[in-house]
Image (cartoon, grey):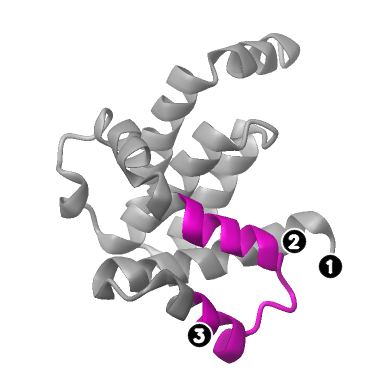
Amino acid sequence: MNRSQMRVFARRSALQALYQWQLTGYNLTEIERQFVEEHGLGHGDPAYFNELLHEIPKNLDTIDAAIGEFTDRPIGGIDPVERAVLRIGAYELLYRAELPYRVILNECINLAKTFGSAQGHKFINGILDRIAHKNRAIEIAAFSKNSD
């Protein structure tokens, strides 16, 4: 399994763990322990799973503000699966500049298609695309210029 596939597995596991945290409010360390013991992260990137699981809640105000800027409903009114996907995508767009924005959007759309509602991926794409345009304008401009 290559690094990219390991990251996909880590994001998928982080989505499930963040979903659990959002619904239950359980301690993050306990959720992490449960995922490692019960679900195993042998095929994933445990360090990246850990980062997503702990850094997203730590930076929640900034992440939710970025999401909230482009949605007409309160963050708590967003479906819990879609909320977790948006938080992963917003975190990566804001804090992981080395990850191409198109990869982040693609991964989050795939997560939403797998776990979310029938049309949830369109909502995810719209919000994350706006966050990307605001926070990664130089990268997007360079990509657009190179793809002409």
Q: Quadrant of residue 45?
A: bottom right
Q: Amino acid at mark 1?
A: Met
Residue ID at (74%, 75%): 43
Q: Is residue 84 visible?
A: yes
Which residue is the site of mark 3? Answer: 34
Q: Is residue 103 left or right of residue 6?
A: left
How far apart, in angstroms, are the residues tagged by discs 1 and 3?
A: 23 Å
> Which residues are drawn in magenta?
32-55
Residue with the mark numbered 2: 5
Residue 94: x, y in percent? Answer: 50, 33
Mark toward the viewer: 3 or 2: 3
Which residue is more in the foreground, 70 or 29? 29
Quick check: is 49 in the magenta stretch? yes
- What's the residue at 37%, 63% (across, down)? 116
- Label 3 is placed on what type of residue? Gln
Question: Is 50 above or below relative to 74?
Answer: below
**Residue holding disc 1:** 1
Instruction: Assign the N terminus to one quadrant of the image.
Output: bottom right
At a point 76% along the width and 54% down the height, the residue shown is 4
How far apart, in angstroms, are the residues tagged by discs 1 and 2?
A: 6 Å
Instruction: Look at the image and tell me in which quarter the C terminus lies.
Output: top right
Asked if the residue under mark 2 is in contact with the one under mark 1, i.e. CB atoms within 8 Å, the reply is yes
- Secondary element under disc 1, as helix, strand or loop, is loop
